[in-house]
Image (cartoon, rainbow, N blue to C red):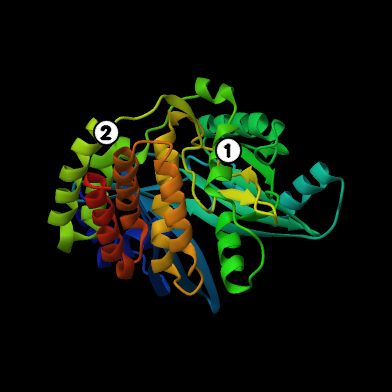
Amino acid sequence: METLEGEYQLLNSDSMTDLLQYALTGDPDARLTDFRCEVDAVHHRPGAEVSVGYVISYTVGDQPVEEYLVATTADVTGQVAELSQGDLTLRVWRHPDDPRLPGLADACQPETVAAWLTEITGSDAPSSLEVLAYRPLRRAVLRAVQGDRVFYLKVLPRKRADALATRHTVLGGSGLAPELLGRPGENVLIIPAARGRSYAQALVAAASEGLGVVPTPAQLVDLLDRLPAEAMSWPRRDAWSDRLDFHTHAAATALPERADEVHALARDLQPLLDAAPVGPVVPTHGDFYEANLYCDPDGTPSHLIDLDSVGPGRREDDLACLLGHLAVLPSLAPESYPMVPEHLAAATQDFESRVDPVALRARVAAVILSLVPSGSPEVRSTWLAEAQGWARSAVTP
């Protein structure tokens, strides 16, 4: 099955109830007492795999049991149960035994993480641990607190862990990002919290409390200008504008009732992306938006986080990433971001004085289109309309 619809229909069907019980017991005919299965999250990589997380509950004797299972169409080995349904083969595992994230099991153990933090900080203050994000087979992010200090644990496959460690070492050494504190577990990185607060938090505070100052567009560009030249030697990752076909497919799948409009938008955007002039290849962040840049109380940008995509690219794509994310913020929480339209307009005006407006606006539309699948059903149509608006303005900015 090549489409999300087909794979998801199976992964969310009644037959999965039987398959998951089989995965838990090893007996295809087993039926666990009070068995319940609820889909928690669907992770779709078009052309690669679909992975679905399930919250499972059942009773053993008189004791309730709750587990988290992940089923994937990916071909993986390890502590997995292999199940077949028609032409589709599924692999299922118990979280946190992710076959491509071998360090995750240790990183999910509070006692283990507490020992890691004690070794790093020299303090044995009480600590707490929570999972912030988990993409099966790809990455996990956990937040640990020891006393009044906050740390983030990132669990990745080996090559990605090595690459991220290099980026934190280089950018941390130049004061642009938190420094890597250690790699105590298999492909587990421990990074301290960034200094200050995120640009998103500064926007909320400035609007709701009259506190703090947000960075100016010029300061944001200056932060990008400070990215080290060494980043040019790192692998280049495709920007949203480079993967328009991929994001078009994902958006059309997430918004099937408007799939024709999604494809029409892509047809309008591609010639603009191909023809509009762009600047030279430069060091880029690759995921430059309000949650990934931090600033001091006076508005001065202090740190960049989520460095996985730092490398050579186009300045237009970094600037478009920020504008695209700002453009959708009001639809997510209008009461929290009443000042965003003002800041978006100012940033757009400034950025268009630095790069070609058509190239910039077409890229903003591509970024917003890429966000459509991650939005709730209530906002997907709004975001598509936003992307369409930026595409139209790219023709006559």
Type of amino acid at the residue the image marks with label 1:
Asp
Q: Nearer the viewer, residue 240 or 168?
A: 240
- Residue that mark 1 sits on: 222
Element assignment for label 2: loop
Q: Position of residue 242 (x, y in %)?
A: 31, 35
Residue at image location 65% in from the left, 53% down from the top: 299
Query: How many numbered discs, if any?
Result: 2
Q: Are marks 2 and 1 in contact (CB under 8 Å)?
A: no
Type of amino acid at the residue the image marks with label 2:
Ala
Element assignment for label 1: helix
| Disc sitting over residue 372 in the figure | none
Residue at image location 44% in from the left, 67% down from the top: 56
Q: Nearer the viewer, residue 386 or 23?
A: 386
Q: Position of residue 207 (x, y in %)?
A: 56, 69
Residue 387: image quadrant is: bottom left
Q: CA distance from mark 2 to mark 1?
A: 24 Å
Residue at image location 68% in from the left, 44% down from the top: 191
| Vertical side of 17 occupied by 292: above or below | above
Q: Position of residue 175 (x, y in %)?
A: 70, 36
Q: Residues within 10 Å of mark 2 (few under 14, many from 20)?
A: some
- Residue that mark 2 sits on: 276
| Vertical side of 261 occupied by 377: above or below | below
261 horizontally vs 188: left or right: left
